[in-house]
Amino acid sequence: MLVLIAGITGFVGIPCARSAFARGHKVRGLARNINNVPEDVRNQLEGFETLSSPYDIAAMDRATKGVDAIICSFAAIPEMFMESQLLLLRAAERAGVKIFHATSWNYDWTLSPGSHELYDDMRGFAHHVAVSSTIKPIYMFTGAIAEYYFKRSPYDWDPDTKTFNFHGPSTFPTRYTTAEDIGNYVLEAITAPDAADGGFIRVQSFEASPEDIVKAYNTAREGRTTAKLNCLGSVEDAENKLNEGRTKNGKSGWYNFIRYIYQYHIPARSWDYEPVDVARFPNVKQTSLEEFFRHNPDV
């Protein structure tokens, strides 16, 4: 199978590529800069198309030609979620591609409309495609991406002090999936016999409360470093900060208050789901929380 990974330089795109190679598939990349692809992945690519802008239709047409499946892992910004992904899907239609995995790795964004500015874009994309396209995309719910929380979001995890920040009870669990596990789940999904039928897939790697995180971190580091907790307030406090942020910044200023969206709505269970499809993909070994910390000594 020849798989196109759009946004291959991202922290989901790269694990998807490695998972595809491990299964013997060919991979073509689409992104802004090939130099941002790790060397081990770059050296194995069947080809690479440079995306000059989010609206580079010509590059998308070249990239989709002759591929068997597409994984869209564009950056988590509204223009890419809605506009670029839709342009890529139209290119897939022109190329006759039937298997299309959409950008979707979050909690269940079909629930609680209006609770998350970017989730609304995902819902809007899914609705528009359902009423206008012959392609039936795959959408995957994964909870929080572990690498994002612990490597990209200093509001949640302070890498210098090894402090986990949260609102609400310290015993409330969050669902997490590691980027490596996402790559494996995605490859299992796009190579399944019913992949062209699309639909929603619900998986996870592990569930962990703030207390679980500290315990697993300290165990994984074997006393060399220790993690701490910092409660920022109640769930109601997070809701108040979210409402204040929306009032002050408006929808276009979503990046100023997005952390409070998660810190309120996850413990409020606004988008919760059951990972019922884990059993559907027995070839994927779920990473545990302690394994995640052991595999990422830089966290």
Image (cartoon, rainbow, N blue to C red):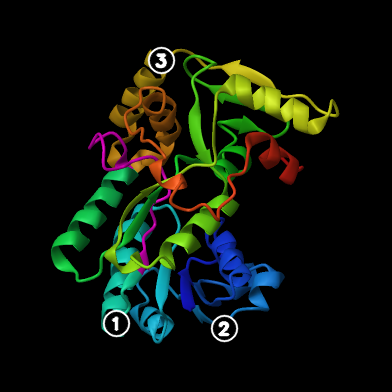
Q: Is residue 126 left or right of residue 40?
A: left
Name the mark on residue 237. 3
Predominant secondary structure, magenta span: loop
Relative to residue 152, is residue 115 drawn left or right? left
The residue under label 1 is which amino acid type?
Answer: Gly
Which quadrant, please, contains the C terminus? top right
Residue 46 badge: 2
Q: Which residues are magenta?
A: 100-117
At 29% across and 36% down in the image, what residue appears? 250
Q: Earlier in the sequence, mark 1 or mark 2?
A: 2
Question: Crowding at label 3, few (<14), some or many (≥20) Cα neighbours within 10 Å?
Answer: some
Question: Do labels 2 and 3 touch, CB within 8 Å?
Answer: no
At numbered mark 1, what does the secondary structure look like: helix, strand or loop? loop
**Mark 3 or 1, closer to the camera:** 1
Q: Residue at x 38, y 36 (%)?
A: 274
**Cα gap from disc 2 to disc 3, whole angstroms:** 50 Å
Of the residues shown, which amino acid type is indicated by label 2?
Answer: Glu
Question: Taking the image as drawn, is residue 55 in sight?
Answer: yes
Which residue occupies the foreground of this view, 55 or 226? 226
* Residue at the disc numbered 1: 96
